């Protein structure tokens, strides 16, 4: 490698470190200031707030995946968190804010039990078992309908009023959650997770108690998933068994993978992308119906199936061509630009 | 109310339903055994098989049972394309990638089906209506035919694996793929063939399913889970395991529904799964190391 | 030095993003609704403020029923606009209806909130029509309530959608906050133009008690004290459980001679029902009440008759009144009963003239026969038109009051009084629909069954509607004596 290249490379590395910090600060300020610029109640409540909620949810899934455990049933914990927080507030009168945390805690407790069965399982088994647990959770909640009332569902008591208050509340929750997850991933715990994900056998040989760490990852992940569930119940202002559906299990996976599996910003990027698609693409549905509707006479509205198919295709493309997600594409572009700038400077 | 004849019928249907699951599970098991690949979109291949059979029987006016062949060929082609374009690229990378690819495929298959055939339920009209009734127990001819066809297909698979060159190559690859490569076996060709074969089996299962039950684009998810439960019960990579597992599962499903109530029929797959995995993580028939 | 460049780039990026966000927002800002000018002179020149009426159709397009609602809505809007539109006195002119599609996917609770919010807050609809599932409607209606948008709910089998009560808490605002909407006021914007679970069950149990039981008793020489043996098989969700609860309640309160001999439920994702049917067969019922949507009901009936050998009378719920039901059943539809409120297949000639024209127009435009959900939706558009014309303005509170005071002759859905009126008592903003029972008879040419109304003989206002006598299906086996 030439001297110039080596020089550029080390500069790039240092830039990367400081860049992260600045971006984080800028990002936080940006999110805080956003509602003052965007004057639309709809965008604040229905686009930005869910982005934050799903950022937590996707990050929780991401944390688990960092330890090599790809859960296909995270909706179970979303639902447990949601129902617990809502029921505690309604039936026992626990203040909804406290209920939110208890929702997360209870979800983590269940996560502990499920984690126990999962720690020794390989990826596909774990996927199956976690998916199965979501089905069992749905069945159980349906079975105890007379107590829980989840089949018809019910309105959830709110912590803060809708709109801008809810936005800032969710922002605070998301910032704290992502920060904690960041600290976990950067700590020795996070390194252990990474090692297990890369090669479990080797990790074991270096003395890591893989079962213990996998269980810890499970508990931490399900706590945040439960928290996200409570927030989701706040956002929709309703909760019923549909929260246990496979769709909610696959969403955090898609967000984390498309954004960048294993990174901190990956789930955030994924959340922004997917929530935007769901919020804005429906506007062109009438256009799409006009253009291609006649090709598909069997459906009245071609928009939604095309959109979902698009998500599947994006997922495939990301996994095959850019396994580190959109985050890596942004990174590569940035480094490329910085290198060019540094090269021009020399 | 539980009666002996009720129980007997329940067991009989368990077996009949189990047959379709067996076909699905065998396809999955073969793919896993040879390629060590797990495809969560397998149930969607069943769904596509049902739709292809439906379309050919309606458009070409063919007998429902002849349409099975079309379904098998059609889905095999889809399997071929899928393997070459997607799974091949992620084989060898971390296992999670296979799960992600499967998920992407699920979304694609389901929504393509919705675009082409709509959201409504469809059913393939059968060519042998009627029921056979013996001693208070009845079963439709369709189900009996399905059992027979499954048996025929399974036998052919066994013959294929044991007697043909490609079958032996598959067996060799499943045991030690690096050694197989050294022996001159074109492993890539074997992989693509295996996947297409597994897909064809799913297509056949779909065509049979479509004659007996109504189906819609969202069909795929549950059969996949059931197929997985079966091969885990029976041991990954083992065909006899898939057969026994399929029958056991079918019986467990109907019996659970009979005794505990209909809402437990689906969940039973997972309860069983978790139970087996906790006790014997390699499945009832222990399988090759996973 | 590098850091400064970094900061500069970051600042530029942020400014660009914020600027484009702002621009995007500005381009999205719809033209503000014109405020009504109080000084309206008695001229006949149309007001320059006139604009089209934005009505949001809340339907789940991933469901076949949602697509039926879409077609019916478009037909209604086309008809109304072809005649010039809706007359708004305030503007001295007729204005057309602009149909805004609010696609709620499968209409689950999570899927309705977003689209309805966008319709209310961004598209600024004047009125909403639709809704299908109870949970989805309950979740999604909150936004409409908070923004005081009249919502004519044409689906949802539960009367909770218009129930006033301790559900308040809209917006999570404190009791003394001026922006908080009281439950009474908020719910006043909700109207339920649909049958509820008790409407279905009432007709069904009355039919069994009044018509089928006497027929059984005389045919099989049962003692009249023998109770009618009814089995229930239902999907385990709010809809299924609601119907079952109402059925049992009605039997108890009216002291009907009906005994529930078997009761089986299954998960909404089930596709096969043999075990449940076997248990029911062993309980030897006289009839089976199947509570589910089209695909599963057809499957249950087919499996029951074909596979399990349960040769009894099956009665399906009105949501099965749809072309797909007849197609899926095929020959196994023969003798099957269907509780219904809109019989698009039982004619021509139809029991109601409005149905003749609707079916003919729908068929001409879409080449298929209409289903039940669309009928409610179609009527709702005419209800909206009538209300707006009587209110003379698009002011939502005025339109709401106008809907509440409606007194139109019935259209596609029959009512007990022959008029469309919304109740104002505890059972709030509901209608009094008439439901009836049809029996399907196989038609070899069509290779499908077709219905004939068998109960009741007459209904208020319309008079006699019975088209055929109820007969026991071929091969029928009664329950145990």
Image (cartoon, grey):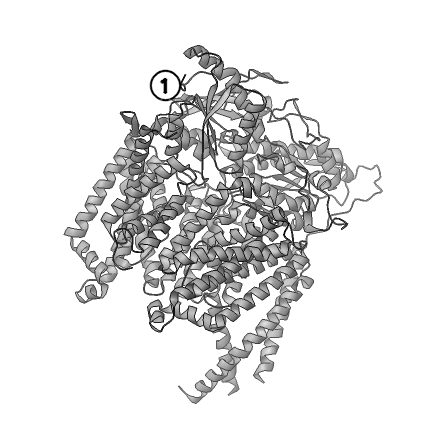
Residue at position x 75%, y 45% from top?
Answer: C49
Please tell me how crowded label 1 is: few (under 14), some (14-19), or many (20+) other residues with Cα within 10 Å. Answer: few
Figure quadrant of the C terminus of chain C: top left
User: Vertical placement of C65 versus A214: above or below?
Assistant: above
In percent of width and height, residue A72 lies at 43, 55
Quadrant assignment for the N terminus of chain C: bottom right
Residue B276: x, y in percent? 33, 51
Q: Is residue C203 left or right of residue A205?
A: right
Return the residue at label 1: C475
The x, y position of residue C329, in whole percent, is 41, 29
Label 1 chain ID: C
**Extreme residue in the front direction:** A92
Whether residue C13 can be seen here:
no
Residue C83 position (above or below residue C37): above
Residue B86 image position (x, y, % from top left): 35, 59
Question: Which residue is most to the bottom?
Answer: A3
Mark 1: which secondary structure? loop
């Amino acid at each position: 490698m030439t001297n110039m290249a080596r020089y550029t490379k080390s500069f790039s590395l240092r830039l990367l470190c400081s860049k992260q910090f600045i971006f984080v600060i800028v990002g936080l300020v940006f999110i805080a200031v956003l509602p003052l610029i965007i004057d639309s109640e709809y965008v604040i409540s229905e686009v930005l707030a869910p982005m934050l909620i799903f950022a937590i949810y996707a990050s929780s899934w991401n944390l688990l995946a960092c330890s090599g455990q790809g859960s296909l049933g995270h909706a179970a914990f979303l639902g447990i968190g949601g129902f617990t927080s809502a029921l505690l507030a309604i039936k026992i009168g626990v203040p909804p804010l406290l209920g939110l945390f208890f929702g997360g805690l209870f979800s983590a407790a269940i996560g502990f039990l499920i984690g126990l069965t999962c720690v020794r399982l390989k990826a596909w088994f774990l996927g199956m078992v976690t998916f199965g647990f979501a089905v069992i959770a749905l069945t159980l909640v349906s079975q105890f309908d007379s107590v829980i009332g989840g089949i018809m569902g019910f309105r959830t008591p709110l912590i803060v009023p809708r709109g801008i208050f809810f936005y800032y509340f969710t922002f605070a929750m998301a910032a704290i959650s992502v920060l904690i997850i960041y600290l976990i991933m950067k700590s020795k715990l996070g390194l252990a997770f990474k090692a297990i994900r890369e090669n479990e056998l080797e990790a074991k040989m270096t003395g890591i108690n893989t079962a213990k760490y996998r269980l810890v990852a499970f508990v931490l992940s399900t706590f945040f998933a439960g928290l996200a569930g409570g927030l989701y119940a706040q956002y929709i202002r309703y909760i019923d068994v549909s929260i246990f559906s496979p769709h909610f299990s696959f969403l955090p996976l898609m967000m984390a993978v498309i954004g960048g599996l294993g990174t901190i910003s990956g789930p955030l990027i994924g959340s922004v992308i997917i929530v935007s698609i769901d919020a804005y693409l429906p506007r062109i549905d009438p256009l799409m119906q006009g253009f291609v509707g006649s090709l598909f006479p069997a459906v009245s509205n071609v928009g939604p199936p095309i959109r979902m198919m698009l998500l599947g295709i994006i997922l495939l493309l990301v996994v095959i061509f850019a396994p580190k997600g959109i985050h890596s594409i942004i990174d590569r572009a940035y480094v490329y630009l910085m290198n060019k700038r540094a090269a021009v400077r020399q | 109310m539980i009666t002996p004849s009720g129980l007997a019928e329940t067991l009989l249907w368990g077996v009949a339903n189990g047959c379709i699951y067996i076909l699905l599970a065998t396809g999955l098991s073969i793919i896993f055994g040879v390629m060590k690949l797990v495809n969560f979109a397998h149930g969607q291949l069943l769904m596509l098989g049902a739709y292809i059979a439906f379309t050919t029987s309606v458009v070409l006016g063919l007998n429902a049972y002849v349409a099975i062949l079309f379904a098998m060929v059609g889905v095999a082609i889809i399997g071929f394309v899928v393997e070459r374009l997607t799974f091949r690229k992620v084989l060898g990378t971390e296992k999670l990638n296979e799960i992600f690819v499967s998920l992407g495929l699920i979304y694609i298959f389901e929504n393509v089906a919705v675009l082409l055939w709509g959201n409504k339920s469809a059913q393939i009209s059968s060519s042998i209506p009627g029921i056979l009734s013996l001693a208070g127990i009845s079963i439709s001819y369709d189900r009996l035919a399905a059992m027979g066809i499954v048996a025929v297909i399974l036998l052919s698979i066994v013959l294929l694996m044991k007697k043909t060159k490609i079958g032996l190559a598959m067996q060799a690859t499943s045991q030690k793929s690096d050694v197989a490569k050294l022996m001159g076996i074109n492993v890539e060709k074997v992989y693509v063939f295996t996947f297409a074969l597994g897909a064809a089996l799913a297509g056949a299962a779909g065509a049979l399913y479509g004659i007996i039950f109504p189906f819609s684009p969202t069909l795929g998810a549950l059969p996949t889970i059931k197929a997985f439960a079966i091969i885990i019960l029976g041991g990954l990579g083992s065909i006899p395991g898939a057969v026994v597992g399929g029958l056991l599962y079918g019986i467990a499903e109907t019996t659970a529904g009979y005794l505990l109530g209909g809402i437990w029929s689906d969940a039973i797959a997972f309860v069983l799964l978790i139970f087996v995995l906790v006790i014997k993580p390699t499945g009832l028939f222990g399988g090759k190391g996973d | 030095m590098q850091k400064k460049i970094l900061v500069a780039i970051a600042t530029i990026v942020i400014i660009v993003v914020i600027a484009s966000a702002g621009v995007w927002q500005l381009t999205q800002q719809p033209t503000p609704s014109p405020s009504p000018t109080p000084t309206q002179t008695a001229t006949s020149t149309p007001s320059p403020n006139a604009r089209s009426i934005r009505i949001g159709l809340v339907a789940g397009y991933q469901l076949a029923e949602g697509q039926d609602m879409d077609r019916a809505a478009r037909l209604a809007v086309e008809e109304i606009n072809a005649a010039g539109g809706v007359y708004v006195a305030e503007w001295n002119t007729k204005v057309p209806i602009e149909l805004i599609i609010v696609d709620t996917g499968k209409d689950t609770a999570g899927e309705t909130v977003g689209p309805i919010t966008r319709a209310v807050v961004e598209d600024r609809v004047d009125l909403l029509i639709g809704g299908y599932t109870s949970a989805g409607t309950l979740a999604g209606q909150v936004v409409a309530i908070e923004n005081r948008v009249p919502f004519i709910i044409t689906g949802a089998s539960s009367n909770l959608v218009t129930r006033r009560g301790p559900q308040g808490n809209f917006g999570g605002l404190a009791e003394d906050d001026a922006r908080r909407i009281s439950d009474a006021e908020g719910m006043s914007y909700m109207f339920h133009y649909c049958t509820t679970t008790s409407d279905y069950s009432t007709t069904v149990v009355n039919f069994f008690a009044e018509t089928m039981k006497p027929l059984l008793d005389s045919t099989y020489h049962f003692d009249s004290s023998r109770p009618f043996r009814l089995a229930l098989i239902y999907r385990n969700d709010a809809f299924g459980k609601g119907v079952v609860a109402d059925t049992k309640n009605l039997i108890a309160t009216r002291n009907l001679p009906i005994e529930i001999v078997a009761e089986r439920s299954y998960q909404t994702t089930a596709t096969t029902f043999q075990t449940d049917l076997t248990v029911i067969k062993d309980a030897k019922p006289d009839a089976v009440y199947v509570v589910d949507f089209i695909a599963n009901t057809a499957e249950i009936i087919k499996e029951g008759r074909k596979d399990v050998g349960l040769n009894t009378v099956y009665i399906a719920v009105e949501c099965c009144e749809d072309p797909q039901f007849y197609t899926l059943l095929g020959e196994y539809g023969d003798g099957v009963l269907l509780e219904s409120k809109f019989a698009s297949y039982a004619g021509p000639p139809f029991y109601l003239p409005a149905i003749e024209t609707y079916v003919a127009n729908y068929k001409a435009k879409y080449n298929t026969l209409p289903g039940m959900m669309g009928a409610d939706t179609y009527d709702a558009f005419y209800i909206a038109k009538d209300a707006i014309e009587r209110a003379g303005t698009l002011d939502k509170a005025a339109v709401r009051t106008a809907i509440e005071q409606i007194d139109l002759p019935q259209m596609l859905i029959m009512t007990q009084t022959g008029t469309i009126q919304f109740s104002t008592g505890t059972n709030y903003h509901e209608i009094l629909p008439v439901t009836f029972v049809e029996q399907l008879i196989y038609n070899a040419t069509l290779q499908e069954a077709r219905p004939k109304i068998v109960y009741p003989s007459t209904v208020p206002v319309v008079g006699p509607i019975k088209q055929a006598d109820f007969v026991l299906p071929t091969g029928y086996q009664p329950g145990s004596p």
